[in-house]
Amino acid sequence: MGGRRADDLFCKARITWRGAILLGKKVACDAHEPSRPVRVITHAHDDHTRELSRSIKECSWVIMTEATRDLLSVLRRRDIRRLPNVLGLKYNSPFKLGEETLTLFKARHIIGSAQVLVEDEEGSRLLYTGDFKFPGTPVIEADVLVMEATYGRPGQVREFEHEVEERLVELVRSGLREGPVLIFGYHGKLQEVMQILADGGVWAPFIMPRRIYEVTRVCERYGMIVGDYMPEDSSEARELMARGEPYVAFYHSSGYSKVRGPKAAMRITISGWELSRPVREVGKREFIVGLSDHADFKGLLAYVEECKPKLVITDNYRMGSGAILAEEIRKRLGLPAFPMPSRSPIKRDLAEWL
Ligand SMILES: [Zn+2]
C-alpha cells in the first residue's frame, strides 16, 4: 500500500459530469451512472438523490442507510422500503460486491447521512465523505479521498459556531414572548433545530406541515429528541393557533415568501451561508441564524489532514468551491488535490505535481 502513487490511484475514483462519484469498478454515489450496477445514496437531500427511480429500475443494488431509505419514502411519496434491490445498510457493516467491499460510516449532516468506503481487490481504500460537518464526523483513513466542498473558500469560516445554538434558543424564547415564531430551513436541519430547542427547554409546541411532520417522525424513530410536535392540519394545532397561544412553526425554506403567519410572528431563516455572525437582524422581527450542517473551510482542511490520503478529489459539481478548495489543499497540506469534474486537463496537472 505504502508505495502506491497518486497516478496509480487516479483511475480508481472520479466525479462525472452528471455528478456521480465513482468509486472502484462498480459503485456510483449520489447520481445515476448507466455503466455502474450499484448506486449509493449518501443522504436524502435533493442534489444527492437525482434519478433515483432510474437507478431503482436499472441497478442491481441501490444502497443507503435505513434512515435515508425511510426519509426518501416520505419525501418522494413512494414507499421504497420493500423493493428487492433497495438495501438499507447499517453503519460499519461491510457489504461484499464481488472483489470489492463497500462500507457506510456515519456522517454528521442530517439523519441517515453516510460516508462511503470502497476497498478494492488491490487493497486501495476509496472514500467519499458525502456532505458532512466537522468536527462531529468520524474520520475514515483512505488512499483516495473524495470530498464535498460547499464551504471550500478560505474566508468561509464560522468563528461563532460554539455559541450559535445558545443564541438560537435565546432568540426563539424572546420571540415567543410576543407571539408565534416561524422557522424556515431545509429537511433535516429543521429537525436539528427542533432538537436544539427541545434541549434548550423551549416549552411551546412545534407545528408543521404534514410532510415536515412525517420527516420529523422518521428522525424521531432514529433517535432524535424533537420535542412536542404536531401537524398543522390537526385539530389540536388549529385550536392552539386560533387561541393565539405561542407556538413554533417549521417550514421548508422554499415556502419563505408564501407563508406569512400572524402579524406578531417572528421569522427566522436558518442558513449556513450566514458567516459573519450567529444571529443577524434583516428586518422587523426577521432574522437569519448561521447554523450549518456542513464543515466550514477549516473543518474541511482538518478532515483531510486526519484522513491522510495520497490523493484528494473535491466535488466541483454541486454548489460550492471545489477548484479553490483543491488549490488550498495543495498549497497548505502539500497533497495532490484536484476538482472534478473539471475542464482543465487534470492528468497533465497531476503529472506536473508528481
Ligand atoms: Zn446535504
Image: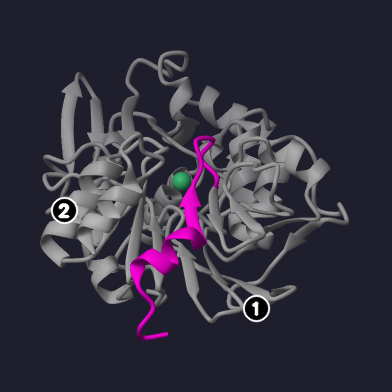
Name the quarter where the C terminus is drawn: bottom left
The residue under the point 30% across, 37% down is: 344
Q: Quadrant of the N terminus?
A: bottom left
How far apart are the two marked residues, 2 and 1, measured between alpha carbons? 33 Å
**Whether residue 146 can be seen here:** yes
Q: Is residue 154 toward the left or the right of residue 46 in the image?
A: left
Which residue lies at the image location 41% right of the left edge and 40% below the top edge? 341
Residue 222: x %, y % from top left: 61, 63
Q: Which of marks 2 and 1 is in front?
A: 2
Q: What stretch is highlighted in magenta?
A: 1-20
- Residue for point 60% across, 58% down: 220
- Residue 133 picture quarter: bottom left
Q: Is mark 2 on a helix, strand or loop?
A: helix
Q: Position of residue 42 (x, y in %)?
A: 56, 55
Q: Is residue 268 shown above or below 284?
A: below
Residue underneath mark 1 = 94
290 horizontally vs 188: left or right: left
Q: Indicate the position of residue 64 as horizontal and vertical percent values.
A: 65, 58
Q: Is residue 68 above or below residue 244?
A: below
Give residue 328's mark: 2
Alpha-carbon neighbours of circle 2 within 10 Å: few (<14), some, or many (≥20)? some
Residue type of the residue flagged with mark 1? Pro
Task: Residue 280: give x, y in percent of width and height.
Answer: 16, 33
Of labels 2 and 1, earlier in sequence is: 1
How many numbered marks does the figure carry?
Answer: 2
Classed neighbour count for the residue bearing mark 1: other residues with Cα under 10 Å, few (<14), some (14–19), many (≥20): some
Residue at point 47% right, 33% down? Answer: 249
